[in-house]
Image: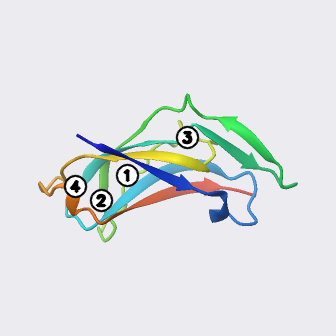
């Protein structure tokens, strides 16, 4: 059974950037061999920062769960799967993400060997 992790993506990761919006998401693993599956849920409540520094709230609770079937190690020779190119298009990356990873990798390695996850956000901004 997958355990749900909560990861905060603060707006400070995007200094001097406005109207930050997602285009796609991906994920990499550290510490395990083989690929695994995972699911991501975008922040339900988020906001956009406009160039005048005002924050405009956005409700993203209806954005579907994103399923990644092939999350690969960061040192893998091919890029990881990227998802959400239609469903997360223009969503804000700011806020609490929910991430769950399958219990075993394709090589049978258990999740507790996982040292870290890298969340890859493909965004656009002004």
Q: Secondary structure at mark 4?
A: helix
Percent x, y of residue 40: 43, 43
The one nearer the camera, 38 or 55, is 55
| Residue count near mark 3 (Cα–Cα under 10 Å), binned few <14, some 14–19, many ≥20 | many
Q: Which of the marked residues, 1 or 2, is nearer the chain's N terminus?
A: 2
Which callout, 4 or 2, points at the residue further toward the start of the chain?
Answer: 2
Q: Of label 3 and label 1, which has the lower sequence position?
A: 1
Tell me, yes or no, whether the two marked residues, 3 and 2, touch with CB atoms within 8 Å. Answer: no
Which of pointers 4 and 2 indicates the residue nearer the eye? 4
Question: CA separation, marks 3 and 2?
Answer: 21 Å
**Which residue is tagged 2?**
72
Q: Earlier in the sequence, mark 1 or mark 4?
A: 1
- Residue bearing the label numbered 3: 88
Identify the residue position indicated by label 4 in the image. 111
- SS type, badge 3: loop
Q: How is the image coloured?
A: rainbow
Q: Is residue 102 left or right of residue 8?
A: left
Q: Quadrant of residue 61?
A: top right
Q: Is residue 125 left or right of residue 63?
A: right
Q: Quadrant of residue 108?
A: bottom left
């Amino acid at each position: 059974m997958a355990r749900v992790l909560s990861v905060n993506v603060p707006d400070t990761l995007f200094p001097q950037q406005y109207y930050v919006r997602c285009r796609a998401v991906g994920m990499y693993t550290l510490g395990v061999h083989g690929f695994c599956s995972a699911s991501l849920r975008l922040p339900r409540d988020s906001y956009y920062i406009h160039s005048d520094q005002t924050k405009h709230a956005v409700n993203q609770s209806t954005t579907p769960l994103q399923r990644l079937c092939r999350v690969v190690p960061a040192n893998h020779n091919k890029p990881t799967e990227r998802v959400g190119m239609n469903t997360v298009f223009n969503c804000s990356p700011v806020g609490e993400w929910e991430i769950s990873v399958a219990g075993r990798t394709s090589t049978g390695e258990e999740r507790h060997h996982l040292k870290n996850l890298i969340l890859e956000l493909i965004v656009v901004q002004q």
